Image (cartoon, grey):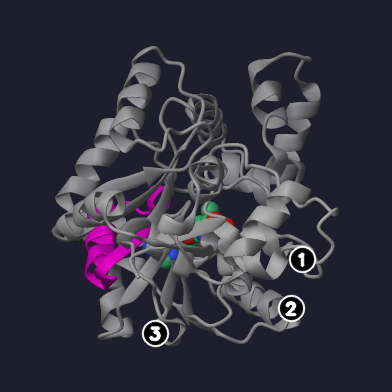
Amino acid sequence: MAQINSLLAIRQAVKTHYETYVYPQFPLLSSVRRCDTYALNLESLWSRFNGEKLGSEEQRILLAGCGSFSPYPTAVANPNAKITALDLSSANLQRAKFHTLLHFHFNVDFITGDLGDASVFLGKDRFHFIDCYGVLHHIPDVCSALRSIHSLLKPGAFVRIMVYSHCARKLVQSAAKAMRILRINNTNKIRDIYNNTTNGSRFRQCVDSSYESRFDWGLADLFLHPYAKAYRLDELLSLLDKAHLEPLLFTHQEASSDTQLEIKKLRTLEANQLLSTHFILFAGRTEDSEIRNKWQKDKTRVDTVISLNPVIKKSLPLLPFMPLKPDQKLGFENPPIDVKGNFLLSRFKHPVKKSTIDSIRWQAIQEYLRALFLIETID
Ligand SMILES: C[S@@+](CC[C@H](N)C(=O)[O-])C[C@H]1O[C@@H](n2cnc3c(N)ncnc32)[C@H](O)[C@@H]1O
């Protein structure tokens, strides 16, 4: 009973935090370039993990802990999907709703609630893609949140997760602890401390290294959060395993697209206290691993079809000499869409059989497939 009360008290404190410090607070008129949303496109992600074309009439996305901004870029990337934006904080949802409507996107439903209880208010709804970015580390009963995510995924579906890494977050966690001990509870006091520290101090470095710390909402998220747990890699992998989820692809900075290789690399970096990134990854239900393995095998022996990521298709400049460089979202530098790239990609405005592509072009195409500008499916 005492434990339940303490979980409820933390949830209430987290909710109050986000009612006070709406996160993030980008100007309402700020817009995203459509091309920069390419990695949120469900049809492309679905083909990457399952090798199937997903019909646009059935696409369902859940933003689990959406904050005040993410429904907008997700709607830009998926104009035909039915998107559900869920958050504990009504202030965050209100701003997200306003931002999305202001930019003329009307395919998002907004729901106030706790991810752990989602099955109660979402009923039989199931999703192809759940985005849970920067949320789980604020939930004390993370096992039940992950179980909830698992139960809301359709067969073949996936979740994107971002959680703090213990190693990368060390300085911030120590500073936040110090704030709690000193009973510092507002951002003005944090700024006073910052102004009184010497150049090169660890606290100054910690503040300066974060873009968000320029704003009150960012400073509060860093140092005044009532609950922010940072995870070690094996802790995270074990939580996923318990929820019957498995990593499919890591997408943090410099992540390898070979998941097992990336896990090894992260373990070594962590053991040597050198890990400087948080964990960002896609995970899928372990029950579906056979479907995914079959796709990986089929890819090498079946005549697949290559087409353009719908977001890139709409973003390709009409004038090919105008270069396009979507911001990197999968952890590595994107190949440029220059004149040659535009010419090559334009060929895939209509699906093309792999067998018709010559081996010289295939090299360049593979780079665009890795970047998700092109997608590959079984016919
Ligand atoms: C750091 S923000 C991240 C927002 C957004 N995902 C993004 O990347 O911009 C964390 C969000 O998770 C929400 N949140 C925290 N605990 C939650 C819970 N148990 N259920 C639903 N939302 C929750 C907060 O209200 C907040 O909006």
Is residue 120 in view from this perspective? yes
Amino acid found under the numbered disc labelled 3: Glu
Residue 139 covered by magenta stretch:
yes
Left or right: where 9 falls relative to 103: left
Looking at the rendered structure, the secondary structure element under dot 1 is loop
Left or right: where 267 falls relative to 190: left
Residue matched to label 2: 103
Looking at the rendered structure, the secondary structure element under dot 2 is loop
Q: Which residues are magenta?
A: 136-159
The residue shown at (29%, 53%) is 142
Circle 1 Cα neighbour tier, 10 Å, few/some/many (<14 / 14–19 / ≥20): some
The residue shown at (61%, 39%) is 184
Q: Nearer the viewer, mark 3 or mark 1?
A: 3
Circle nearer the N terminus (3, 1): 1
Q: Nearer the viewer, mark 2 or mark 3?
A: 3
Is residue 16 in view from this perspective? no
Looking at the rendered structure, the secondary structure element under dot 3 is helix
Q: Is residue 332 above or below residue 97?
A: above
- Report which quarter residue 71 is drawn in: bottom right
Q: Which of these two is toward me, 24 or 217?
A: 24
Instruction: Say if mark 1 contacts mark 2, CB within 8 Å.
Output: yes
